[in-house]
């Protein structure tokens, strides 16, 4: 049995990077020409010159709240807010995510690029796959169904809820695998035991959309189900997926992933935790530098399975660390603005402590040098940018935690 979905997974990192950077300027030009939102945000950008990660990093990051705000503002004219390159008659389907955000589904086979992740989870042509994701409003059900069908699987659209009926269908149809959230799979397995209905055919699973702790992975394994997680969004499709090595998630072949300091568009050094920013090569929904709002970090080296793409640690929390201090909002972008004024500062973390109405801010900064009055000048910058007073603590390089936090709110509100 072939261990890889296709030859793209095992090409040299140099060949992959060359291919991605060759496709990037064409995707930027396409977005400028076909998506009005990018025609505006990338106005003046010479697409043909965006041929490196450094050039990509100079483009603005589009974060989800911006996409949502633009969709809401332009709903009468364009339900996608000018971010999609297709509309009615070309889009096969349209879905709604929380916040009344709409995503198009194009006509391409495996539009969401899920087949690769399913293959890594052990699914093969000829399998019957039980789809436990919702088909209602959100695209999750369609994402998995189209990916499984592109792989050559038959799909049972189980959806969510009705656990007893799910168990009965699995007992009757004997699917080889399950696709859905890990928590719902656990409910199904527990209900099957309660009903006295053996479901021995279910031996593999591709799970996502929520945390998948090792304890649940092991619980399923004890019951004969080997489950692997995948990571994706309704906007981007698959971003990364787990392999049998169980060492992080391998990035999908159809996206360019950066990890940036939260609140900025600045890439962090390899291994440092930051926000996942993704550029998709999907021509129908050509999102350029889309900020997922999720935290992760790059793992060194390549996957022991022979897949050579970059690996990430997986989901490590949310990057939105905005806090309210003395009636004013403080966000990571403001911390970044303070830091940019001081070349000697390499990293910063704003710690908020105390109690409501009696809270305090302390900016902890890593610096290898301490020019005269650095603390005082940093304190002045904090007040200038945030309109709030803050203390400053100088720290040695490498002493701040590598957890992606730019704002650490330690207050406890009872």
Image (cartoon, rainbow, N blue to C red):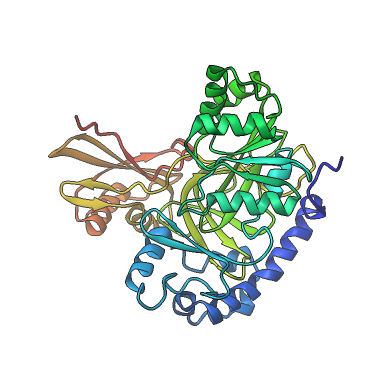
* Residue drawn at x 61%, y 70% as measured from the top left: 283
Side (left or right) of 261 relative to 300 = left
Q: Nearer the viewer, residue 97 or 15?
A: 97
Q: Horizontal and vertical percent for residue 360?
A: 21, 39
Image: 117 above or below 383? above
Q: Horizontal and vertical percent for residue 98?
A: 39, 53
Image quarter of residue 245: top right
Quadrant in which the C terminus appears: top left
Side (left or right) of 153 relative to 84 = right
Q: Is residue 84 visible?
A: yes
Q: Nearer the viewer, residue 227 or 166?
A: 166
Q: Is residue 302 visible?
A: no
Q: Nearer the viewer, residue 157 or 224?
A: 157
Q: Horizontal and vertical percent for residue 201?
A: 71, 28
* Residue drawn at x 57%, y 22% as measured from the top left: 192
Q: Horizontal and vertical percent for residue 263?
A: 40, 55
Image quarter of residue 180: top right
Quadrant in which the N terminus appears: top right
Q: Nearer the viewer, residue 102 or 240?
A: 102
**How many marks on residues?**
0
Taking the view exactly as shown, the residue that stands out farthest to the left is 357
Image: 255 above or below 128? below
* Residue drawn at x 52%, y 68% as measured from the top left: 58
Image: 201 above or below 265? above
């Amino acid at each position: 049995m072939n261990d890889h979905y296709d030859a793209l997974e095992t090409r040299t990192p140099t060949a992959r990077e060359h291919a991605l950077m060759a496709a990037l300027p064409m995707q930027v030009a396409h977005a400028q020409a076909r998506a009005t939102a990018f025609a505006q945000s990338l106005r003046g950008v010479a697409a043909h010159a965006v041929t490196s990660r450094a050039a990509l990093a100079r483009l603005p990051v589009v974060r989800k709240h911006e996409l949502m705000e633009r969709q809401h503002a332009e709903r009468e004219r364009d339900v996608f807010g000018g971010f999609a390159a297709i509309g009615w008659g070309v889009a096969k389907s349209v879905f709604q995510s929380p916040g009344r955000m709409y995503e198009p589904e194009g006509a391409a086979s495996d539009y969401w690029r899920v087949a690769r992740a399913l293959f890594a989870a052990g699914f093969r042509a000829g399998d019957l796959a039980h789809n436990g994701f919702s088909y209602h409003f959100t695209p999750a059900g369609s994402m998995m169904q189209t990916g499984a069908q592109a792989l050559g699987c038959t799909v049972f659209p189980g959806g969510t809820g009705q656990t007893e009926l799910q168990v009965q269908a699995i007992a009757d149809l004997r699917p080889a695998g399950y696709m859905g959230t890990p928590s719902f799979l656990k409910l199904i397995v527990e209900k099957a035991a309660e009903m006295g209905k053996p479901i021995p055919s279910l031996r593999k699973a591709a799970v996502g959309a929520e945390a998948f702790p090792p304890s649940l992975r092991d619980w399923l394994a004890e019951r004969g189900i080997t489950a692997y997680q995948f990571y994706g969004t309704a906007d981007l499709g698959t971003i990364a997926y787990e392999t049998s090595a169980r060492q992080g998630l391998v990035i999908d072949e159809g996206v360019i992933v950066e990890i940036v300091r939260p609140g900025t568009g600045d890439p962090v050094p390899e291994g440092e935790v930051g926000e996942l920013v993704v550029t998709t090569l999907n021509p129908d929904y050509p999102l350029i530098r889309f900020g997922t709002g999720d935290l992760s970090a790059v793992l060194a080296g390549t996957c022991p399975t022979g897949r050579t793409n970059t690996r990430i640690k997986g989901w490590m929390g949310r990057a939105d660390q905005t806090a309210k201090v003395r009636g004013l909002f403080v966000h990571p972008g403001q911390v970044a603005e303070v830091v940019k004024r001081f070349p000697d500062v390499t990293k910063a973390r704003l710690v908020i402590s105390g109690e409501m109405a009696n809270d305090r801010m302390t900016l902890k900064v890593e610096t290898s040098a301490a020019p005269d009055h650095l603390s005082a000048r940093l304190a002045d910058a904090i007040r200038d940018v945030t309109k709030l007073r803050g203390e400053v603590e100088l720290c040695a390089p490498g002493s701040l935690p590598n957890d992606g936090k730019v704002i650490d709110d330690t207050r406890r509100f009872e």
